[in-house]
């Protein structure tokens, strides 16, 4: 059958996505800039080969597809996407749909959606999460662009997506760059989840002197409780592996310098634009940046001696750490969903908040048991802070004391916990009815006559600074 679905870009993600599409019974045409790769891909597809049409030129690729064409781009984010769209444009018809499935910046997707409208074709920007495995066997998909175009592509995307109790993890989030925005926040949360796990790992390793395999057992046990999640699961997996060459746990020989491609940083930057506090995510991005300053950290250790020292006695227990991580995680997700809610209003997307939590329940990197509870809470109060949803109030009441204990013991012993600390400060600030911003207002008025409000009174006032009522 002549395919309507095509995919450009046969890197790991693109290849796996194409195989997933074929596996689900769709005929698909594929194209890659390096032609040899296309041939190799089709040859190696085994039983799925019949479903694939390899093409050598863009012209052949477009001709192989029946209109309305659904053309998925899986090329590196940035200008390459624009180049690819420009190359396709003279070849396609108005009802055809170009679908950017890379990790695009949502601003670029907004722009491309607007350009598509002007130039007379259709454009969708979709966030795809789940790494290589997800692409092949079921990712989580966050869609953005014209609703009608999404509806036409949805049967394919729903078929290939992960399923949560039979429900497809592929959802339309809103117009323009909404899908890529949601994917960006997903990645910000991913950074924060990873960092909080790394902080707890640090306390177990340096504060409690535990070996990597023992830490693996702790994580594996936690994965059976409220912290159940993909990231806890793989943390247990990586902690138990012994390196063949060195004969020691592989974690102990991996260099402590974190890479990043930028999506976590984008989340922090966009949060600042929106004026929403995502302190846990910001701390996680900063921690990766600090990790990259390897030489400076080594100098610091020489000058001041190494920071982490053992935590004495049972000041912290394993159960406390579990609770601390739980509380930190709730604070982090409360921030992330608050950011989504603010963006939804600012950009007039009408983001379906419970659906965001639902689409993250399976397939993506941050999938966890807790996301189902979040979806349930958001169904009742979509725009309220998750920290105030009854289910999470209960959880936080039972866990924030342990978060405080972990953060304070960490501070006393030099086992740094930037993301967990940020979450704790956020939690405390969000339950402080009388904050210290009155001082900020007084300072602003003193040096710049910026005015302040008086408690219980309407209107702007100036203070009698320097004895004179300005
Ligand atoms: C996903 C991931 C993925 C991301 C990697 C690496 O949802 O599948 O978020 O999109 O590219 O996790 O990200 P960093 O290189 O920035 O850590």
Image (cartoon, rainbow, N blue to C red):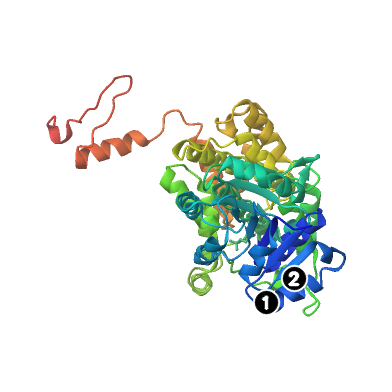
Q: Residue at x 65, y 59 (%)?
A: 202
SS under mark 2: helix
Q: In the displayed structure, would residue 437 be above or below residue 13?
A: above
Q: At which x and y percent is residue 30?
A: 70, 65
Residue placed most toward the observer, 324 or 286? 286
Tell me if 133 is positioned left or right of 93 in this view: right
Residue 342 shown left or right of residue 58 in the figure: left
Query: What is the quadrant of the N terminus in the image?
Result: bottom right
User: In the image, residue 245 lies at what x, y percent?
Assistant: 78, 80
Q: Which quadrant of the structure image shows residue 287? A: bottom right
Residue 35 is tagged as 1
State which mark lies toward you, 2 or 1.
1
> Alpha-carbon distance for marks 2 and 1?
38 Å
Instruction: Report the residue that reaches farthest toward the left.
Output: 468
Badge 2 residue CB within 8 Å of ligand 1: no
The disc label shown at residue 250, or none: 2
**Marked residue nearer the N-terminal end (2 or 1):** 1
| Dots 2, 1 in contact, CB < 8 A | no
| Crowd band around label 1 with a 10 angstrom C-alpha radius: few (<14), some (14–19), many (20+) | some
């Amino acid at each position: 059958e002549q395919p309507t679905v095509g995919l450009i870009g046969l890197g790991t993600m693109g290849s796996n996505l194409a195989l997933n599409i074929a596996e689900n019974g769709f005929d698909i045409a594929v194209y890659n800039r390096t032609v040899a790769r296309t041939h190799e891909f089709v040859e190696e597809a085994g039983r799925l080969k019949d479903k694939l049409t390899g093409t050598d030129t863009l012209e052949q690729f477009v001709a192989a597809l029946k209109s309305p064409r659904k053309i998925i781009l899986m090329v590196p984010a940035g200008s390459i996407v624009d180049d690819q769209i420009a190359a396709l444009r003279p070849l396609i018809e108005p009802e055809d749909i170009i679908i950017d499935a890379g990790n695009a910046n949502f601003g670029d997707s907004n722009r491309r959606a607007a350009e598509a409208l002007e130039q007379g074709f259709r454009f969708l920007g979709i966030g795809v999460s789940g790494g290589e495995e997800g692409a092949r066997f079921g990712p989580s998909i966050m869609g953005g662009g014209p609703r009608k175009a999404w509806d036409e592509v949805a049967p394919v995307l729903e078929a290939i997506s992960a399923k949560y109790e039979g429900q497809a993890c592929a959802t339309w989030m809103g117009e323009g760059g909404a899908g890529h925005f949601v994917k960006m926040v997903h990645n910000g949360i991913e950074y924060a989840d990873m960092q909080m796990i790394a902080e707890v790992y640090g306390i177990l390793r340096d504060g409690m002197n535990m070996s990597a395999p023992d830490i693996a057992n702790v994580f594996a046990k936690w994965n059976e409780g409220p912290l159940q999640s993909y990231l806890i699961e793989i943390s247990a997996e990586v902690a138990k592996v012994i390196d063949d060459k060195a004969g020691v746990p592989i974690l102990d020989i991996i260099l402590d310098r974190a890479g990043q491609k930028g999506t976590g940083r984008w989340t922090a930057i966009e949060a600042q634009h929106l004026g929403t506090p995502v302190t846990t995510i910001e701390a996680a991005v900063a921690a990766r940046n600090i990790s990259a300053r390897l030489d400076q950290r080594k100098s610091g250790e020489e000058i001041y001696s190494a920071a982490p020292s053992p935590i004495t006695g049972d000041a912290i227990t394993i159960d406390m750490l579990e609770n601390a991580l739980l509380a930190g995680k709730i604070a982090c997700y409360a921030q992330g969903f608050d950011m989504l809610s603010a963006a939804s209003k600012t950009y007039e997307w009408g983001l379906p908040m419970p659906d965001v939590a639902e689409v993250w329940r399976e397939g993506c990197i941050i999938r966890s048991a807790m996301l189902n509870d979040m979806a349930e809470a958001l169904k009742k109060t979509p725009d309220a802070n998750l920290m105030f949803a009854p289910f999470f109030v209960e959880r936080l009441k039972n866990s924030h004391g342990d978060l405080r204990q972990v953060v304070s013991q960490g501070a006393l012993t030099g086992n740094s916990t930037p993301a967990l600390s940020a979450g704790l400060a956020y939690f405390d600030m969000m339950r402080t009815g009388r904050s210290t911003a009155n001082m900020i207002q007084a300072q602003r008025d003193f040096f710049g006559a910026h005015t302040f409000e008086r408690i219980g009174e309407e209107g702007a006032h100036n203070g009698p600074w320097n004895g004179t009522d300005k």
